[in-house]
Image: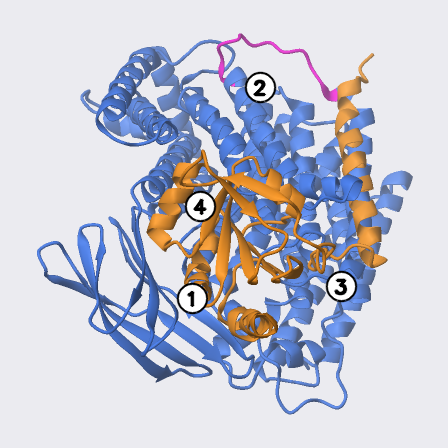
Chain colours: A orange, B blue
Amino acid sequence: MARSFTHFLPLLLFACFAVIASIALVMTLSGERKPSELPSALIGKPVPPTELPSLYNPQAFVNIEAATSQPYLVNFFASWCAPCRAEAPALAILAKKIDIIGIAYKDKPQDSQRFLTDYGNPYTAIGSDNEGSAGLNWGVYGVPETYLISADGLIIKRHAGPIDGDILREELLPLIRSLQKQG
Amino acid sequence: MLSPEFGHFCLVLALVVSGAQIILPMVGLLRDDARLIRFAEPLQHLASMAIFISFASLVYAFIVSDFSVQLVASHSHSLKPMIYKITGSWGNHEGSLLLWIVILGLFGMLFVVRETASRLKTLTLMVMGGITLAFLAFSLFTSNPFTRLSPAPPDGRGLNPVLQDIGLALHPPMLYLGYVGLSVAFALAIAGLITGEVSKNWARITRFWVVIAWSALTAGIALGSWWAYYELGWGGWWFWDPVENASLMPWLAATALLHSVIVVEKRQQMVSWTLLMAITAFSLSLVGTFIVRSGLLTSVHSFASDPARGIFILFILLGAVGLPLFLYAFRAGSLTKGSDYALLSRETGLIINNYILVVSTFIVLIGTFYPLALELFTGAKITVGAPYFDATFNPVMGIGILFMAIGPLLVWRRGMVGSARPALLLSAAVTGIAAIILMASSGISVAGIAGIALTLWLALSIGGDMLFRLRPWQAGMGARLRLPATQWGMWLAHFGMVIFLIGALASALFEQENVVRVNKGTEIALGNETVIFDGVEERIGPNYVTETALLRLFDRDGKLIDGLYPEKRFYPAERQTTTEAAIRTRLSGDHYAVLGDGSAESGYTLRLYHKPLVSWIWFGAVMMAMGGLVALYRRPQRAQKASLQAEQGLREAE
């Protein structure tokens, strides 16, 4: 019997791939799935309860509270992420206007610390999410990702990707100003 | 004459001719009618010519800024420099698709000219006609580049400034030469499956086209990575982005094919596997096109994505991959022969090579598509980034390099080159000692030391192989230099890998970075050097205005080395800002400066890097590509005999 199962294997693998790609495509076409638009299920909802070991002191914990007296930002970053370096200047500017809580996503603490020494530390508190579990709860798509939280602990805005000058000036700063005025 | 309508007409003509290129020879083969079979070749020439004229009309419309053509209006601008008007014709979806077809036509034409007439050639041309037909239909029905616009706007909307760049202008043609070149091997594999004859001759023909495609693909990927390095301004050269992965997967499969086809040529082994690799390599090129065009995956390369076109590509993919794999499933079994080689042999070495390359292709494939699959079944959006690939791809490649040093020292059927044992023992000893010294005396991570050791091991074994084969200490080296071109090509390509690894390792392990906020006159330390910031100047370019930072670079003794002028450009027509990194490239390493946000009052953000040996990454890639081309060189008959004798002499000497 010359015809063996192994020669069918490539066809089977390809069939699996084709089925997945077809479903994805149909969903994209019907508008159920928007690859460029990230899901905003969390917008307007309270922040997911998050408690992480502090980056610089693993015995202590960083808590992201459901309600604080001030609006704040939550920024997911990692030392292995090139765009995170690109947004370092923008975060430095933001840090002067609003508190930023950093979450080091899937990153070894010593690498994150080195990254912050090199690129500056704009954060008021930093949690270490080495396992990526907090990222899962927040539905993080990739790093860097930034969330704006209102004083009553609701997620106002989500920005995926690095913060550049335009996003800073035209989107984030006006929103922060209006939130701070309300507060 | 070169009006858009004529270009459109030629595209339709090419579609009809490609259809005929399949049907006429097929009828001829079924009826055993030689006249009909002979039609395949002139039809291929006709289709290629029609495609070339069509592309020329599109480029012409860009050159004269004919804004009544929708594509020109949305991607060009009268103020743009001429070179970018021309390259802009393929800096968009419709145009780049037409370029893809042009290269397909070019390969078809060259194939007709180079190969002698045979059943295999006819069948291959039919398959290539099928591919051309599918892509012409895709172009005409979903992405027609010649659509008119009425009324014509007074000026165009311009090209994305990020795309106004010479590296990016050359990157797609080079990459497409690689992608499309693989279609020839693919067509040959299908023809081989149909005829059931996968002979030495089949392998000889296929190897030529695989090597051409592989060399172009290597150069194309290198150009893309070089572009990302100097244009994106992040200082990196590879980001494991889906679009990059899309070009890496066919490269890995083509590398496997490049090696396995030699086994078919020399030994008639690994036949069905080689056919599978030929199908896989081109399929992955199509998958790459699918990823980029369908918008299924988000990426930093937001080129053109329209899901409606994805449907069409999905059908092309189903036909172009599904049918050959179906054919393979039923026919490959009859092509398999029993193996007749020892465990320690060149054959085994190349099988290991192929398995490692296939595993790494799978790793990249999974890293690219797993997030999509997971999202479909669970709704969770995740990202797979550098940590995944560092943990999976790099170790597998490390094992690959371990074997890459041994494989070329093995001989066909059984055993090793006589001089291999001392060469390998010596390399192992030197590598081991070097690794221990590094481990004890430097602060480099274990992974870093492993990388250095593997690179050293590979370099030493190639050097040892060359030394013991050529024996410069003995008389008559002139005769020994006349080794087959394939041997020199292999050495060059493998040594290119060493150079690439040195660049990749040195730039990662010994990089110096500094990110600072500066005011006029600030001194910044960067490793041994110092940089002084002399403020920012506003300048005006042809179609942009720019803020240019003035930086002076001093060495450790305070001597001025050079000036660095990173820019931030604003393109008014597109209302977009780009950053232009200032890069001072030397063989010893690059100084890389990026100007960030800021103002004269609050100061500017600067990012400075020193990346040792980083340009070796691209030198290495160029050497690999050159190695491929060298291996193709065929000497005139007489010299060929001499080189065979030289090889014979070597074997006897062993």
Of A15 and B114, nearer the camera is: A15
Query: Chain letter of disc 1?
Result: A
Give the label, 3 or 4, closer to the camera.
Answer: 4
Identified by mark 1, the residue type is: Lys
The reply to whether dot 2 and dot 4 touch (C-beta < 8 Å) is: no
On the image, the x and y values in percent for residue B475 come to 19, 22
Q: Which residue is mark 2?
A: B267
Identified by mark 3, the residue type is: Ser
Circle on res. B603: none
Circle on res. A79: 4
Identified by mark 2, the residue type is: Arg
The reply to whether dot 1 and dot 2 touch (C-beta < 8 Å) is: no
Compared across the picture, whether A56 is left or right of B20 comes to left
Separation of marks 1 and 2 at Cα, in angstroms = 70 Å
On the image, the x and y values in percent for residue B624 come to 43, 41
Compared across the picture, whether B49 is left or right of B498 comes to right
Q: How would you rate the neighbour count of disc 1 (Cα within 10 Å): few for under 14, some for 14-19, many for 20 or more?
A: few
Taking the spot 76% from the left edge, 23% from the top edge, the residue there is A7
Q: Is residue B173 above or below residue B459?
A: below
